Every structure is written in structure tokens, then in C-alpha cells.
Image (cartoon, coloured by chain):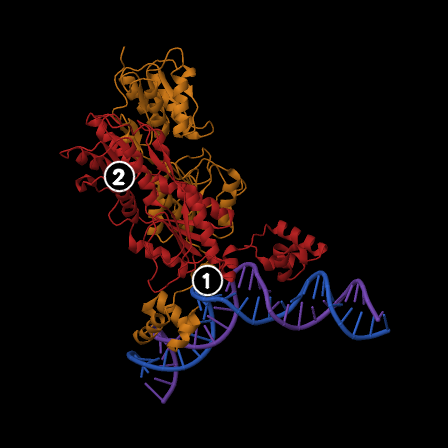
Chain colours: A red, B orange, C purple, D blue
Amino acid sequence: MTNIRKVAEMAGVSVATVSRTLKSPDIVSPGTREKVLTAVELAGYRPNLMAVQFRSQKTRNLVVLVPTIANTFFARVISGIQEAASQHGYAVLLCNTLGDEQAERGYAEMVANRQADGVIQLRAFNPFDEAADSPIMVNACEVMDDAPCPRVYLDNRAAARVMTEHLLELGHRRIGMIKGPRQSPLTRDRMQGFRDALAAANIELDESLLCPGDFTLESGYRAASVLIETRERPTAIFCENDEMAIGAIQCLKEQGLRVPDDISVAGFDDIAFARYCDPPLTTISQPAEDFGHEAVALLLGLMDGGDIQRETRRVMPFKLVVRDSTGRVQR
Amino acid sequence: MTNIRKVAEMAGVSVATVSRTLKSPDIVSPGTREKVLTAVELAGYRPNLMAVQFRSQKTRNLVVLVPTIANTFFARVISGIQEAASQHGYAVLLCNTLGDEQAERGYAEMVANRQADGVIQLRAFNPFDEAADSPIMVNACEVMDDAPCPRVYLDNRAAARVMTEHLLELGHRRIGMIKGPRQSPLTRDRMQGFRDALAAANIELDESLLCPGDFTLESGYRAASVLIETRERPTAIFCENDEMAIGAIQCLKEQGLRVPDDISVAGFDDIAFARYCDPPLTTISQPAEDFGHEAVALLLGLMDGGDIQRETRRVMPFKLVVRDSTGRVQR
DNA sequence: ATGCACAATGTAACCGGTTACATATCTTGT
DNA sequence: ACAAGATATGTAACCGGTTACATTGTGCAT
């Protein structure tokens, strides 16, 4: 393989001159520059990035820990990360962890091992040693309450409250909820927003209308089948993501219920399918790609040792998108 | 940062002994091994992977070029790649190219630059210099006819033929098709399978029933709205992927048509949503994750210089999944 | 006791860039 | 004409592992 020494020999200069010609052309004389560049061309020389990385102790790789890439919302966030990263000359090492904490710890070690310069964690779990109090990490989407790093997230509580108020305005009083995994702070926050709205409207929450789910289509389907069996059926169901909402709608329709005439359904995330299901889904839209952009920006800032502190937070905006899956309550 | 020399000093041995203790413990005496291991522990020593990679000239990174990560089928393939790669100690560098050939060429250079050991390309495009006749690459899913590398793919022609025969058996004679992007060999092959089945049944193909699409929900919706305006409306529509089928169904229902009573719709891929749309979609299921596993296996074989040749091919199995979106033709 | 095989460990070259420092050459002001 | 500074280029150390080769030590056969 052609290396810098061979090129130097061909051009009749020293290795330092070759290196300088490629990195800061302005400090070598035009004549030598010409000689070196033709030699580079002739030899088809490409600097060995591994040597560069080794020397500079920077990989220009970012590790991204994602619970499931199969989730369309995460897929969009990753697109955003990828886009921002390559704009800044970073590559993305994707790690589909399926929530396996041991695997996440392993991937986080890639930073200690110098396979990557930093980590973007999309789940509320700290894969670093507790002792390390300032890991090179940014936590996005599902954030920890006490993350020792910058955070990018949605005000899930406020968003859930807005959606609940929308349902209340349509006259719904018995509202079911299909929740995410128990340990997810997303679930806790969205639940809290739901409670806030009910409390403000002086409505008592019927705990039997809270159903667990895990953000998959299947779990939404199963949860809906449970909810419609309750003694007094809810007139609306608020699902913590769109996949579960779509699963729920399918179940309701199979049971002969009309959406939204007999029962309203709301989702969360505004994935592409939300607009194309039947009926199109009322949901909360989030700027998924921007979560990715912002996470990368914070991580790069953190690595630069700039003014990004571990307390830094970015709260992203949301929007209530009303489509046809929610309607005025019938009596 | 603690390096091997510091550990050697702490343990009172040479750097070679430390290296050997960690790489082939059996060739150092138990006594020294003990000393070295405690020193490693004490110092919290982690070998600098960049140095290791530099020395060995192997990165243990694989580049994956994917047209859109937002496509649920590709998301599953990537899951499979990731899984197989990490089983073999490789990390995945994900590159969401959006079909930008310039970007793909740039990512392919990561191999020449030693940022990665090989490439998995999920699109029918050769990002390497034509001159390089054996790039370290495997082409999967959308494969080139003349790829200079191993291939993993479905017999799309046969699968499309099977689906078309299913529609013919249900009595359909006027069948529309929503195609993928013109330049995709997937489209060409599925079209060919479609033609094969019609020809075998002695049915002439009405070219006006072929509609272009681009594998997105939106394009399926638009194409369907065009198809139902044709003078003599088709009784079935075969879509080249599930996203377009779901978009099409939504359009048909909005126009007051019942699926499958008025018009049947078939998809391709069997994504998770296919089972949960209304009506559940008849489609072709592909072992998406296995495409990923197989692609990694071939790539590793290619890198080992084993018996994997550039002519090697793996044809993956498919299955017709009949659900409720296709039905007997009404008259 | 001598020689030989083999095991355990040490020494130092090497991978391929980058860059601090040294050296040589050319300007410019007095 | 000469000092001082600027400009251009070369030399070699360095990053942190790995490993060929050298060295030393140990056991065993003769």
C-alpha cells in the first residue's frame, strides 16, 4: 500500500512536506505543492485514516444506542442523527440494543476503548459506570431524570395534557389509556399529563381504564381488547404511541365498533402511517429528525469542551394534529 | 491515560509480557499472569483499540449503505445485519444515503481509507470505482445484475408471479400494478413475474394499468387515485411494497370503494403494519432479518478470502401470506 | 558435567501519519 | 554589508500496541 513515505520519495521531498501539502497547502511553496500533488495523484495515495485517528486520538465516530430501530419514530431520529453527524464529518455506529443493559454497557465501552468519541443514548438508562460522573454522552427522547449528561426531550407531560384536553373538549369523560412499558419515564410523564388534565376538569380517574403496553402494534391490539370488556366501556382511548393506536383501532373495528363514532382513539408521535390509517389518526407530532440534529449538536459541543454542561437541556416543541380518529362523544 | 507501558512497569514485567498475558494467557507462567492481571485491574487498563486496529490494519467496522432507514423493511434488514455483525465482533457504520450516489461513493471510500473493512450495499448501485473489480462488498436486497460481488436476494420474479397467480385464481382479469422506482431492478423483476403469470393465463396486459410509485405511502395513495380513474377500473391492484398498498387502500376507502369487495389489493414485504391495517393485507413475506445475517456471513467470508467468490449468490425464500385485502372478484 | 530442547521473558522495530524543533534560504531595514 | 526576521523544508520523536528475534533459565538425556 502506498504510504506517505513513498509519496515523499516520489516527489523528492520529506514526509513532513507531503503532510503539510495535504493539511495546510498555503504554507508550502507553489512549486513544491505542485510536485507533491502530482506524486499523490500518480501514486493514488490516500492517507491511512487509522493512522490519523491513532495519532490524533480521535475516531470521528459516534455511538448511537437505540432500543429498536424497527420503531418508525426512532428510525426518523436516527436519520436526523446521521444527517447532522456526517455534516460534521462524523460517522454513526448504530447499536440496536433491544433494551439489553449488558449490551448497552458493552457498546458504551467503545468510548473507553477509543472506538468512538461519544454516545447518544435514546433510552433512559445510563450505560456508563456510575462512578464516571461526566460521560461523553447525550441522552435524547427517553431521558433519565438524573442523567449525568445533556438531554434532548419533549415536554411529554404538557403534550399528554394537551391531547387529553382535546378529548375532554369533545365531551369524553371516560377515557382509557394504553401505556408504554412501566419503567419508561415517557409513560410516567404522559400519565402525569393525563392526570393533570382530568384533575383540572374535576374528573376522577378510573384506574381500571389504564392498560399496559409496550409500544408495539400487537400490544395496542391486545390492550384494546381488554379495555372494551370493562363494565363501562370508555368513549375514548389515548395511546402512548401511534403503533399501539393503530393496533387498537384494528381491534376495535374487528369487534364491530366504529372509530370515532363509537369510540375515539388518539396516538402520539405522528409517524408516517398515522396519516394513512383508517380513520387517519389524531396524534401529537414531534420533530423527530430535529431530536437527532440537536443531540448531535450537544454531543459535539460537549466534546469540544464548549459551554455545554451536563445540566444542559433542550426541550423540543410538539403539535396536536387533529385528524379523524377522534370525534365528539355520542350518547 | 494508562497505557501498556505503565501497566508493565507496575507489574514489573515488559510490555510484551503484558500484551501476551491479555492475548494468549496460556503462554505466560501462572505467577506472572497473576501479577499482570492485578496490575491491569489496579490501573483500570483498557487496551487502546485504535492502536490495536492501526497495528493490525483491521477496523472491525462494516459500512452499511441503506437507501432509507425509514422504510420498515430495511429497518428489519439492518437489525439482522447488526445482530450478525456484533456476534462476530464487528460494529456497524450506518449510512442513510437517500440514494445519493455521490454520498455512497464517499462512504465506500471508508474502506480505502481504512475506516471500515467492508461494505454491505442494500441498493443496486456500485459505489466503487469501476476499475476495482473485486471490492470488499456484498450486495443485498436490491441487487445489481452485474454486481462484482456476492449477492443476497429474493427471486422477485417468482414471488410476483405467485402473487399474480393468487389474484388470477380469485378470478381477477384486470389487475393494476403500482410499481417502484423505474431504475430499480426490483421493479423490473416483479413486473416480469407479473407478466409471466398473465402470459401463462393468456391474458393481455393493459399497459395503462401500470402506475409508477416510489415505495412510500404517499406514492401508493396517489397512484391508486389515478388507477381508479381509468375507463375500465381494475378489480385488483398489486403493489410492489406494503407501504404503497396501505396508501392505496386508504385512497380507495376514501373514494367509497370497499376492499376487497369492490377491489382487491396486494402488497409485498409483509411489514408489521400489514397485519394491522384494515383489511389486513395479503402480501409476500420475506425473511428480512435473514437477509442481514446472510449478507454479513458472505462479507466475512469474502474478507477471510475463503471460498466466497464474487459470483456467490444466496436466494432467500418467500411466502405468500393471504389475508383479507384480496377476495374473489365480484361481477 | 555437557549439550540440547523448550519454556518464559525481554528488547526493539514496526505500523503511518503529525508536528516540535532544527536548519537553510531569502527579505528587508539601517 | 549585516543583523533580524520571515519563509520553506527537513529530521526525528511520538502515539500504543504487536511480534520477530534475542536472551535467559530449566529440565532431561547422555
Residue in front for this viewpoint, A145 or B235:
A145
Which residue is painted at 18% across and 35% down in the image?
A227
Residue that extends furthest to the left in the rendered view of this protein: A231
| Residue B173 to residue A109: above or below | above
Q: Which mark is residue A201?
A: 2
- The location of residue A56, given as percent across then percent down, is 52, 61
Which residue is painted at 71% across and 54% down in the image?
A30
- How crowded pointer 1 is (Cα within 10 Å; few <14, some 14-19, many 20+) is rated as some
Q: Which of the chains bears the disc numbered 2? A: A
Kindly check if marks 2 and 1 are in contact, taking CB atoms under 8 A apart as contact.
no
Q: Which residue is denoted by mark 1 in the rendering?
A: B51
Residue B71 appearing in the image: yes
- The location of residue A312, given as percent across then percent down, is 42, 55
Residue in front for this viewpoint, B327 or A202:
A202
Quick check: do tags 2 and 1 share a chain?
A: no
Q: Which of the chains bears the disc numbered 1? A: B
| Residue B316 to residue A4: above or below | above
